[in-house]
């Protein structure tokens, strides 16, 4: 599903160079659930945005579904993100002036669905995450847990085979965190979604099939 | 949900920023539309005023002055020019395009004495004589296209004014028109018979009082007057009603070149005033145009840049979700379109209202809305708004999607 081959990422600042990824070689198979753990600044997010076709590595190759990701043109990369990758953000990244339904519809709109199709699909997705009765609420009218559930519904809108989650429980209370992890685990087990999750929480990491550690850009299998 | 829904929802959420930017565009467009509306109405009004004066160009013998003409003091032979000059102007209008000659009236004045008082017998050429001229192919009696389109119709003038503006349609060799003062003195009325310089005439009209020298004139056919004066085919002057815009545009120079042996005089002061006023308004429009481009454009560009900066996480999120760069550009250009359209419509309405209210106070003329200008104002606003948003939209499209994940 996702393969990194000798991937390096060097951030150049005015005075020195910082290593984001250091000769990373890893394979995440279809249906896998990998948790990426490590201290801040260790390269976890760099790994995630590189896997998400959002940041070009300094060297090396990244393959997604057998395709060389960074050999693609910008529009093809956008199409790849639209069809194959679902993002979950730590801060949910909901659009503040749109309602819960409209936030989900926005992702469907990008896929070219008609407004009627968008509305129908958005309502089903919100029902799936238990927010059917909050469809017309704007993010500030929802609790953080509800906001993350809207973000989960939006992530699932275009049925991506790969889910990249950046600290999905980082801003949530223990109970909501557990709910979100239950949801992700179910997606992995029942729908076969491949999940790569960056987390600081060992509790959350233990729910994954694999734990990968990240230190100074070096990625190693921990479990 | 469409791209446009997202843009409109976002605009409605940020009303304060939107209002400030909209206000800048509205004021700029309002300034342009109001000044231009007053300027255009002023030009039309000046055209009316010049038109109302009757003839504004005189073609006279080289040695004559305009005073000589008005005093009817051109009776001596040295103050004549050939009638063939009329043909020259008609030919030139037909072939070389003497645009702006609205009316042409050759005249020959002969002094006469009735009951001890001096009057003037003036020969004029009726319209049917122009029609008979081979060179004439129409157009000289029509208002030229360069003239104000809403100029008062000739039928709205009374017969005395009409005589000063347009040739009378027909005039037989033994027919005459009598000025008010003369008609009163000689107790003449329509159909009366009278004898002047030994020739019998039938009065076809006693002209209403005009308060001009025309009140003491008798108008007869030019060729009859030429015969009576025994001067041959000569005239004293050709009165021309020139469209004032055409005069400003060099009609007098063209006539001077065409008739080097005659003197072409114009009511230069009026023309100069009109030219100065119109030029001033015209220049003022350029000043406002620069102001709107700088202030309005800068305001929109600033609004858009700020919008792109504030929305960068949202843009990054949309890109992470699969939005293409072109879609992000469209999103911002659509916002610019809405801003431009809103500012343009409001500006055109406010500008027109300002012109209608302030025009009579500033320019002392009645001002009516000019729909064409309002449409132009909206188009200008759209163009400025879109141009000012091109770079911000480009910057938005180049947003790094990683900002969706970074802490902001």
Image (cartoon, rainbow, N blue to C red):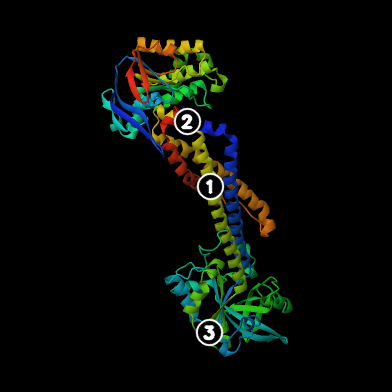
How far apart in space, not on screen, are marks 1 and 3 (Cα)?
A: 63 Å
Vertical side of B366 occupied by B236: above or below? below
Are discs 1 and 2 less than 8 Å apart at CB?
Answer: no
**Label 1 secondary element:** helix
Residue at numbered disc 1: B298
Q: Which residue occupies the extreme front position in the image?
A: A15
Residue A53 seen by the camera: no
Q: Is residue B276 above or below residue B388?
A: below
Mark 3 and mark 2: Cα distance apart in space: 85 Å
Q: Front-most of B349 and B137? A: B349
Give how far across and how far down residue B208 sits, in percent: 69, 70
Residue toward you, B277 or B230: B277
The chain ID associated with circle 3 is B
Quarter of the view holding residue B174? bottom right
Same chain for labels 1 and 3? Say yes or no: yes
Upstream in the sequence, badge 3 or badge 2? 3
Q: Is residue A112 left or right of residue B49?
A: left
Label 3, on which residue? Answer: B81
Q: Residue furthest left?
A: A66
Q: Which mark is residue B313?
A: 2
Report x, y in % for residue B175: 60, 77
Q: Secondary structure at mark 3?
A: strand
| Mark found first going from the N terminus, 1 or 2 | 1
User: Residue B222 in the image: x percent, y percent?
Assistant: 56, 80
């Amino acid at each position: 599903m996702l393969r990194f081959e000798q991937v390096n990422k060097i951030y150049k600042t005015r005075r020195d160079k910082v290593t984001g990824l250091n000769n990373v070689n890893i394979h995440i198979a279809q249906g896998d659930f990998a948790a990426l753990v490590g201290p801040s600044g260790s390269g976890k997010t760099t790994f995630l945005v590189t896997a998400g076709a959002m940041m070009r590595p300094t060297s090396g190759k990244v393959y997604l579904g057998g395709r060389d990701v960074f050999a693609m043109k910008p529009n093809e990369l956008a199409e790849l993100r639209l069809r194959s990758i679902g993002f979950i953000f730590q801060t949910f990244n909901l659009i503040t002036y749109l309602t819960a339904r409209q936030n989900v519809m926005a992702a469907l709109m990008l896929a070219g669905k008609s407004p009627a199709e968008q509305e129908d699909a958005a309502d089903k997705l919100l029902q799936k995450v238990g927010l059917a009765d909050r469809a017309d609420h704007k993010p500030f009218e929802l609790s953080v847990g509800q906001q993350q559930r809207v973000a989960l519904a939006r992530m699932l809108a275009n049925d991506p085979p790969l889910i990249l989650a950046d600290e999905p429980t980082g801003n949530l209370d223990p109970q909501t965190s557990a709910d979100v992890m239950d949801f992700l685990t179910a997606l992995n087990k029942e729908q076969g979604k491949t999940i790569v999750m960056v987390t600081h929480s060992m509790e959350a990491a233990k729910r994954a099939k694999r734990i990968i550690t990240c230190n100074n850009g070096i990625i190693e299998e921990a479990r | 949900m469409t791209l446009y829904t997202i843009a409109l929802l976002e605009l409605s959420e940020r009303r304060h920023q939107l209002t400030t930017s909209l206000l800048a565009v509205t004021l700029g467009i309002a300034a342009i539309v109001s000044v231009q509306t007053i300027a255009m109405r002023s030009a039309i009004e000046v055209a009316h005023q010049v038109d109302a004066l009757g003839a504004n160009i005189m073609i006279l013998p080289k040695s004559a002055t305009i005073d000589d003409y008005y005093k009817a003091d051109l009776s001596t032979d040295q103050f004549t020019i050939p009638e063939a000059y009329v043909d020259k102007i008609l030919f030139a209008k037909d072939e070389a395009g003497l645009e702006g000659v609205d009316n042409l009236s050759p005249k020959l004045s002969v002094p006469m004495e009735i009951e001890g008082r001096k009057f003037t017998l003036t020969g004029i050429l009726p319209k049917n004589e122009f029609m008979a001229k081979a060179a004439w192919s129409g157009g000289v009696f029509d208002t030229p296209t360069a003239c104000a389109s809403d100029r008062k119709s000739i039928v709205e003038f009374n017969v005395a004014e009409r005589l000063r503006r347009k040739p009378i349609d027909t005039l037989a060799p033994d027919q005459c028109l009598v000025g008010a003062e003369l008609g009163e003195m000689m107790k003449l009325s329509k159909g009366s018979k009278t004898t002047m310089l030994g020739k019998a005439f039938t009065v076809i009209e006693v002209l209403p009082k005009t308060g001009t020298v025309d009140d003491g004139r008798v108008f007869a056919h030019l060729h009859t007057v030429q015969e009576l004066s025994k001067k041959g085919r000569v005239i004293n002057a050709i009165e021309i009603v020139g469209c004032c815009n055409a005069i400003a545009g060099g009609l007098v120079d063209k006539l001077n070149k065409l008739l080097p042996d005659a003197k072409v005089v114009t009511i230069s002061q009026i023309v100069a005033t009109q030219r100065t006023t119109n030029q001033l308004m015209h220049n003022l429009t350029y000043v406002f145009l620069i102001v709107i481009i700088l202030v309005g454009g800068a305001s929109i560009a600033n609004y858009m840049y700020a919008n792109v900066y504030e929305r960068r996480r949202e843009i990054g999120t949309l890109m992470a979700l699969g939005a293409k760069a072109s879609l992000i550009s469209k999103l911002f250009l659509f916002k610019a379109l809405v801003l431009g359209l809103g500012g343009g419509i409001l500006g055109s309405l406010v500008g027109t209202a300002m012109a209608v209210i302030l025009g009579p106070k500033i320019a002392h003329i009645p001002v009516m809305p000019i729909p064409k200008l309002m449409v132009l104002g909206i188009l200008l606003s759209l163009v400025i708004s879109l141009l000012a948003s091109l770079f911000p939209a480009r910057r938005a499209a180049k947003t790094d999607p990683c900002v969706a994940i970074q802490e902001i």
